[in-house]
Amino acid sequence: MQTKASPPIALLKGRATHPLIETYFELNHLKQLFRQGWLRVGVSPERCESVAEHSLFVALLTLFLADTHFPQADAARAVRLALLHDLGEAYVGDLTPHDGVGQEDKHARERRAMEQLVGKLPRGAEYLALWDEYERGASFEARLVKQVDRLEMGLQACVYEHQGMGDLSEFFASVDRALEAPALRALLAELEALRPD
């Protein structure tokens, strides 16, 4: 798994510290962890987004879309789900379908990582329950965030194509398969029209 640097938790060298500080150092690895799918198709490390960058944009898109296109959504809950959805990757890494890890195994690894990451925090059980809700797609908000997660990938693919990273049609196809909400499908159609020739 290609990263910018080693996991920052190693900097604590096993020292006992406040749980929030420890969690920060663990989660800081998301800033170091490249989105592996982009590297696989030739996006250079200098231009490749990190998991933390992706997660921030998923949360922002979720906020904006919930506020403007999905009045039935609890926007605050959706943003919380978006902020939590990739945290397990701090320990598991950014596994892609090309890594040969099955969905059940990936889920089990990420759940163990989530337990380790948030279990020591005062509201850790609540954060873990929200993550489980997202993973199961157990609410309207969870299903919305899953779609926004894919839409963000399409938006980033469009940016990379305009930066000369080649034809990223496989990512657009993945987004197309994931989007169900008409408002999101309309955004994808507009995005497709923006792709370079």
Image (cartoon, rainbow, N blue to C red):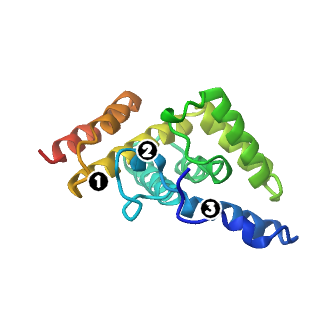
Q: Residue 152: x percent and y percent?
A: 39, 48
Q: Residues within 10 Å of mark 3 (few under 14, many from 20)?
A: many
The amino acid type of the residue labelled 1 equals Tyr
At a point 21% along the width and 40% down the height, the residue shown is 192
Label for residue 29?
3
Q: Residue 42: x percent and y percent?
A: 34, 49
Q: Is residue 190 left or right of residue 45?
A: left
Question: What secondary structure is found at the residue carrying circle 2?
Answer: helix
How far, Cα to Cα, is label 1 from label 2? Answer: 12 Å
How far, Cα to Cα, is label 1 from label 3? Answer: 23 Å
Label for residue 172?
none
* Residue corresponding to mark 2: 37
Label for residue 160?
1
Q: Earlier in the sequence, mark 1 or mark 2?
A: 2
For the view shown, which residue lies furthest in the right direction? 16
At a point 34% along the width and 38% down the height, the residue shown is 171
73 vs 50, nearest the viewer? 50
Relative height, residue 23 to residue 81 (above, below):
below
